Amino acid sequence: LDAISKTDPKICSFITVDADQALAQARAIDAQIATHGTEGIKVLSGVPLAIKDNICTQGTRTTAGSQILRDYVPTFDATAVSRLRAAGAVFLGKTNMDEFGMGSSTENSSYKATRNPWDPERVPGGSSGGSAAAVAARECAAALGSDTGGSIRQPAHFCGIVGLKPTYGRVSRYGLISYASSLDAIGPMAHTVEDAALLLNAITGADSHDATSSGQPTVDFAAGLLPAESLQGGSRPLAGRRIGLVAETLGEGVAPEIDAAIRAAARHLEDLGAVVEEVSLPTFSLGLPAYYVLALSEASSNLSRYDGVRYGIRTAGATDLPSMFCGSRGEGLGGEVKRRILMGTYALSAGYYDAYYKRAQQVRTLVQKEMNSALASFDALLTPTAPSPAYRLGEKSADPLAMYKGDLMTVNVNLAGLPAVVLPVGFMAGAGAEGQDVQLPVGMQLIGRAFDEAGLLQLAHVYE
Ligand code: GLN
């Protein structure tokens, strides 16, 4: 909490800091130790975490970055949160985000813009930018984020931390405020692969509150990581692993320093014993337009619940139902959210459905098939996380298409429902606001087979 009060005025990671409840949780653990000793203390007991503000926390305001939910205090915990609570974790507060997860820089928050701790003139990425910045600035030990099209992974890349988007269904979405239900996933953001594995251990597993949560058996993801002794110099712990470097994600349109960092990471994986081969995924670039049709269509449906009746603020002075709906939504929702509701509604309209929504679903199937068939001959696919490192505040906010294009390398993973981890592989030089040198993190993305988080984390851990 001291770190937050010192750092957050500058970084702006948190929408809500709930010191009272964090201290109450911590004191309960102290009391437990005082009476029962350390017996019963679990691996996450007392570990201070931050939670993205679209994940419901009982008794702590949850806004999803929107004014329409500015007074919303959930009466229940999201399943991921209740499981972390049961594991002894302490919740410091709720982190800033693009409104309803719609954005890639956290500038679409209706509260404030979060700053990148490596250069406060730059964005932390998004939409889980608050969680990423809070971890990178050491305001918390780790955090939860959510990822619909890259929102855990791209901010992890921009802020130099580890981010894991689990397989669709691996973590219950109960209590996650929906953006696009067929793509949304909750996942850990942390300093190390092991920390991410420990968080995943706590939040994973079937849940009767979420019919899309999977009954796939969960394993101990942290115990499966290779011990440090086996990673000593000269050993080739990745012998037998095959990694596909996705040709379409390198070269033109990618910052040369990022291209070079990913190729260097590929060579390092080879030094560790893996076989790295280039693989071509010809439908790769079709994922982005399909994603924006599907995500916005689902969003237009999901966001119809904010009607001034059941959730959130209600406009003052409405005289009838239409003026209440329009007034509440008009006042409560931000510009990017309105743009997306309009586009999504258009794509789903009678007469346009076949041309847009249906075609996008067909493209989704193609992308899915192509990725899965590549993963039949590779253990993981390697790509950059985004074409550029963290950019300056305001640089892309006037141009939504430029912002959307930055999601090219992450959205296919959600279309295919696959797990992917981003981890830091180096830095590139940038210029700060006064022309001074700044170091900008670069993260690589490893995409795994469905439900093979164990193998994926093992790979990432060896690299790390
Ligand atoms: N930037 C993407 C979008 O705006 C992804 C966001 C997310 O994963 N929540 O849709």
Image (spheres, grey):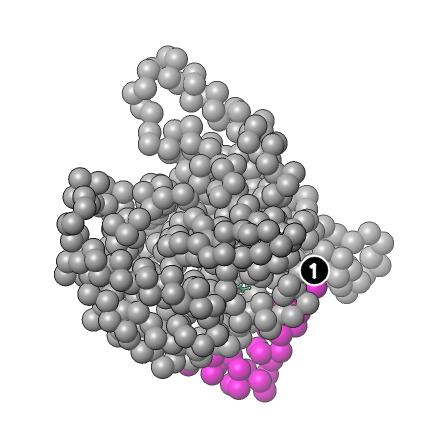
Residue lying at 48% horizontally and 26% vertically, measured from the top left: 25
User: Start and end of the magenta stretch?
Assistant: 335-362
- Image quarter hosting the N terminus: top right
Q: Place residue 324 in its image quadrant.
A: bottom right
Q: Dot 1 corresponds to which residue?
A: 334
Is the shortest distance between ligand 1 and the CB of mark 1 under 8 Å?
no
* Percent x, y of residue 420: 36, 59
- Residue 123 in view (yes/no): no
* Percent x, y of residue 446: 33, 60
Residue lying at 55% horizontally and 31% vertically, measured from the top left: 3
Magenta span contains residue 358: yes
Residue lying at 41% horizontally and 57% vertically, measured from the top left: 443
When the figure is inspected, residue 191 is found, relative to residue 103, above or below; the finding is above
Q: How many marks?
A: 1
Left or right: where 19 falls relative to 138: right
Left or right: where 31 falls relative to 336: left
When the figure is inspected, residue 9 is found, relative to residue 66, above or below; the finding is above
* Closer-to-camera residue (368/72): 368
User: Principal SS element in the magenta part?
Assistant: helix
SS class of the residue under badge 1? Answer: loop
* Percent x, y of residue 83: 40, 39
- Residue 28 in view (yes/no): yes
When the figure is inspected, residue 110 is found, relative to residue 340, above or below; the finding is above
Magenta span contains residue 245: no
Mark 1 Cα shell of 10 Å, populated few (<14), some (14-19), many (≥20)? some
